[in-house]
């Protein structure tokens, strides 16, 4: 992997290409991300780049006689985290992730990764936490069929037979049952980058991307393109 970035989901819209074809796109606020740590084989056993995204909201608590400000964080950052970000020379970040770049040695602390690392036509994989649906039945959760909806039927949206009778006399593990739906990590592969706004760090991705609005999305170059 050579390219990856953290982004937040803005929403969906539609644009027209040069031929006048309408394309549904997801708008992502991609970066800028700051390099907060360089992992090396000598120190950490593997090579990777740790990046931070989205500044934490801070507020000034007081000033001393020298005029120095005591800054506390509304999102919460403890002293070890503050020392980690200070060592990298960046302000505290809300999201911190690692990417195993093939060219990790080319990065330096506090380097910025912006949306312009991608270009129109690139294939990417988008990873995010999907929308939570709460407790759902087997019809919505797994697409199972319903029973007759007539008044005489006593079987409408209930689950059908779960297992055989005498053999094997049990319900196999993995059987689709009602339960919690959504709120899991989902990756959609081979999405196309339709447009890149380098000035505003905006990516337009063709189709839908997992997660609700304002959620964190990881964009990586596709592994199967």
Image (cartoon, rainbow, N blue to C red):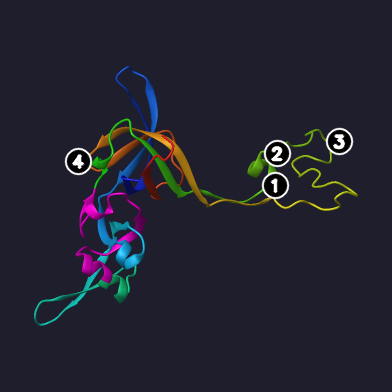
Q: Secondary structure at mark 1?
A: loop
Q: CA distance from mark 3 to mark 1?
A: 27 Å
Q: Residue furthest left?
A: 66
Label placed on residue 199: 4
Per the rendered image, the range of residues in magenta is 84-113
**Above or below 111: residue 160:** above
- Find residue 144 and name its label: 2
Q: Which residue is identified by label 1?
A: 176
List x then y, in percent, for residue 155.
81, 40
Q: Nearer the viewer, mark 3 or mark 4?
A: 4
Task: Identify the residue shown where x is 43% and y is 40%.
Answer: 209
Q: Which residue is mark 3?
A: 152
| Contact (Cβ within 8 Å) of mark 3 with mark 4 | no
Distance from label 2 to label 3 (Cα)?
21 Å
Q: Residue furthest bottom?
A: 65
Taking the spot 14% from the left edge, 81% from the top edge, the residue there is 64
Tell me the distance, in whole angstroms, between the alpha carbons under discs 2 and 4: 47 Å
* Image coords of residue 4 (percent x, y): 33, 47
Earlier sequence position, callout 1 versus callout 4:
1
Q: Position of residue 56 (x, y in %)?
A: 29, 62
Mark positioned earlier in the residue sequence (2 or 3): 2
Image quadrant of residue 52? bottom left
Within the magenta stretch, is there residue 108? yes
């Amino acid at each position: 992997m050579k390219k990856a970035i953290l982004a937040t989901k803005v929403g969906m819209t539609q644009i027209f290409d040069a031929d006048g074809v309408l394309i549904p796109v997801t708008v992502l606020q991609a970066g800028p991300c700051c390099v907060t740590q360089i992992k090396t084989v000598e120190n950490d056993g593997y090579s990777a780049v740790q990046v931070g995204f989205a500044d934490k909201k801070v507020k000034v608590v007081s000033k001393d006689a020298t005029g120095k400000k005591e800054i506390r964080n509304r999102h919460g950052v403890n002293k070890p985290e503050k020392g980690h970000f200070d060592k990298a020379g960046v302000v505290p970040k809300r999201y911190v992730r690692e990417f195993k770049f093939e060219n990790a040695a080319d990065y330096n602390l506090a380097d910025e990764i912006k949306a312009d690392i991608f270009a129109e036509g690139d294939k990417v994989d988008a990873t995010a936490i999907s929308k939570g649906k709460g407790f759902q039945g087997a019809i919505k959760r797994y697409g199972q069929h319903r029973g007759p909806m007539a008044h005489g039927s006593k079987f409408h949206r209930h689950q059908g037979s779960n297992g055989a009778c005498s053999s094997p006399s049990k319900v196999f593990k993995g059987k689709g049952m009602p339960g919690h739906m959504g709120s899991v990590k989902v990756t959609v592969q081979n999405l196309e980058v339709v447009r890149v706004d380098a000035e505003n760090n905006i990516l337009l991705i063709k189709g839908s991307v997992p997660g609700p609005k304002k959620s964190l999305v990881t964009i990586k170059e596709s592994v199967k393109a």
